[in-house]
Image (tube, grey):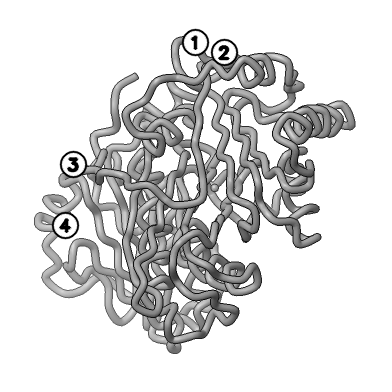
């Protein structure tokens, strides 16, 4: 598979996070000659927070996680398989999840409610747990140089590169580590993207505080990206805090001692979200849509996503065509308040519209030159209020059609 031209130039060395152990396996459920199963074992007392897809047809794995997260269950094990999403498989899919996790609970002497799980891949095919459990039972672990990079590789589907990042911060003077991995390339339009992300830290933070921190981080990152406007049945973000560092326990998300941790979590989620867009199926350009002057932040985000999801906008950018009229169209169809005579549009910093029409002496040449690069910036000022948002997307090319036309082949 050809690697995305937008792949980041540098990836970090991934340090250890205290209180967990990672293993990856080649279960060969769908993929051959690569790992496709991830297990992460956590120390007792690990706290969990999560955000999940709002799809009305979400998978059995998502339903399981939602149920047990709501019950306050701690995290002792994470299992993720790629190739089969076990979504829209009815009661049989639910029984499959229960059977697999019950087996793992018995094997590792933990409660099944303490196991969190995700499945990603084809929809509508029942996941048989036997292939997964066979390799776990014999503990046929793949030899890897770095467990986090191997974990990011194991959860890929159509991804062209593994996605991971890390930060080291202090809480009350004590050093803690935050590592993140993610997968996602197509079916990306999160509403909480197929998208999965897992954050691991040895900080000692309460479940409620973790949830508040994650909710805010996701809103600014995973819920502000789109590749193709399709929301997956399996989207999941989970944050695990083992508490194994020397940092003090913190209950309140607003505690000043968490300032570095909160900022780093925001940064990591945004970095992963942007890597997912950069690996968008067939993507050749990374697009940032900035909205200012909307009635409020919600309206700004709706308008931003309307532009970012427009096939006509995305194909124009793929073709390096400075067709700004498609942006006007996308603003108008959003359903949010807009005034023709107040809308100002700029591409690559070049103002195009003002006072309800194209600016005098508009020169399209620098705009076209900007669109010939890999990074495209669209700025819209609606002139109505203080609402603002930033949304990230990619272009829509023939490559997207080729990947998805052959997805099950």
State the SS at label 1: loop
Residue carrying label 1: 32
Name, please, the residue furthest toward the bottom.
385
Q: CA distance from mark 4 to mark 1?
A: 45 Å
Mark nearest the camera among 4 and 1 is 1
Q: Which mark is residue 367?
A: 4
Mark nearest the camera among 4 and 2 is 2
Are the residues at dot 2 and dot 1 in contact (C-beta closer than 8 Å)?
Answer: yes
**Looking at the picture, does residue 215 appear above or below residue 399?**
below
**Alpha-carbon neighbours of circle 3 within 10 Å: few (<14), some, or many (≥20)?**
few
Quarter in which the N terminus is drawn? top left
Earlier along the polypeptide chain: callout 4 or callout 2?
2
**Residue 341 in view here:** no
Q: For residue 324, what is the image quadrant?
A: bottom left
Q: Nearer the viewer, residue 182 or 3?
A: 182
State the SS at label 3: loop
**Residue 173 shown left or right of residue 367 in the figure:** right
Residue 168, position as x, y percentages in the image: 32, 62
**Alpha-carbon neighbours of circle 1 within 10 Å: few (<14), some, or many (≥20)?**
few
Earlier along the polypeptide chain: callout 3 or callout 2?
3
Q: Nearer the viewer, residue 303 or 210?
A: 210
**Alpha-carbon neighbours of circle 4 within 10 Å: few (<14), some, or many (≥20)?**
many
Residue carrying label 3: 9
Quarter in which the C terminus is drawn? top right
Earlier along the polypeptide chain: callout 3 or callout 4?
3
Picture residue at 66% right of the left edge, 18% below the top: 137
State the SS at label 4: helix
Residue 309, position as x, y percentages in the image: 48, 51
Q: Nearer the viewer, residue 253 or 275?
A: 253
Residue 27, position as x, y percentages in the image: 58, 16
**Looking at the picture, does residue 169 appear above or below residue 65?**
below
Residue carrying label 2: 28
């Amino acid at each position: 598979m050809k690697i995305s031209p937008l792949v980041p130039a540098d990836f970090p060395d991934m340090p250890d996070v205290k209180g967990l152990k990672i293993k990856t396996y080649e279960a060969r459920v769908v993929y051959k000659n690569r790992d496709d199963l991830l297990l992460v074992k956590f120390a007792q007392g690990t706290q969990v927070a999560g955000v999940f897809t709002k799809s009305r047809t979400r998978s059995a794995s998502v339903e399981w996680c939602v149920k047990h997260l709501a019950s306050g269950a701690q995290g002792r094990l994470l299992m993720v398989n790629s190739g089969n999403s076990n979504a829209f498989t009815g009661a049989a899919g639910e029984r499959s999840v229960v059977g697999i996790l019950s087996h793992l609970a018995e094997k590792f002497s933990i409660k099944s409610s303490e196991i969190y799980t995700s499945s990603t891949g084809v929809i509508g095919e029942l996941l048989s747990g036997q292939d997964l459990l066979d390799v776990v039972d014999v503990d046929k672990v793949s030899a890897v140089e770095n467990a986090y990079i191997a974990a990011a590789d194991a959860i890929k589907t159509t991804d062209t590169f593994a996605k991971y990042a890390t930060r080291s911060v202090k809480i009350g003077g004590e050093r803690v580590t935050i590592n993140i991995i993610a997968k996602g390339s197509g079916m990306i339009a999160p509403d909480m993207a197929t998208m999965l992300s897992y954050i691991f830290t040895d900080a000692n933070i309460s479940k409620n505080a973790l949830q508040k921190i994650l909710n805010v981080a996701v809103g600014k990152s995973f819920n502000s990206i789109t590749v193709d406007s399709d929301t997956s049945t399996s989207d999941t973000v989970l944050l695990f805090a083992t508490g194994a560092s020397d940092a003090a326990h913190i209950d309140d998300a607003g505690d000043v001692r968490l300032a570095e941790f909160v900022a780093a979590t925001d940064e990591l989620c945004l970095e992963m979200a942007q890597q997912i867009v950069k690996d968008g199926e067939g993507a050749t350009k990374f697009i940032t849509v900035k909205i200012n002057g909307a009635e409020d932040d919600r309206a700004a985000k709706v308008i931003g996503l309307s532009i970012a999801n427009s096939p006509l906008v995305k194909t124009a950018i793929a073709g390096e065509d400075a067709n700004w009229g498609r942006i006007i169209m996308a603003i108008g169809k959003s359903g949010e308040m807009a005034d023709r005579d107040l809308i100002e549009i700029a591409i690559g910093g070049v103002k195009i519209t003002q006072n309800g029409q194209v600016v005098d002496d508009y020169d399209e040449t620098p705009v076209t030159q900007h669109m010939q690069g890999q990074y495209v910036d669209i700025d819209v000022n609606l002139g109505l209020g203080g609402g603002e948002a930033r949304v990230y997307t990619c272009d829509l090319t023939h490559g997207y059609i080729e990947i998805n036309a052959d997805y099950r082949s």
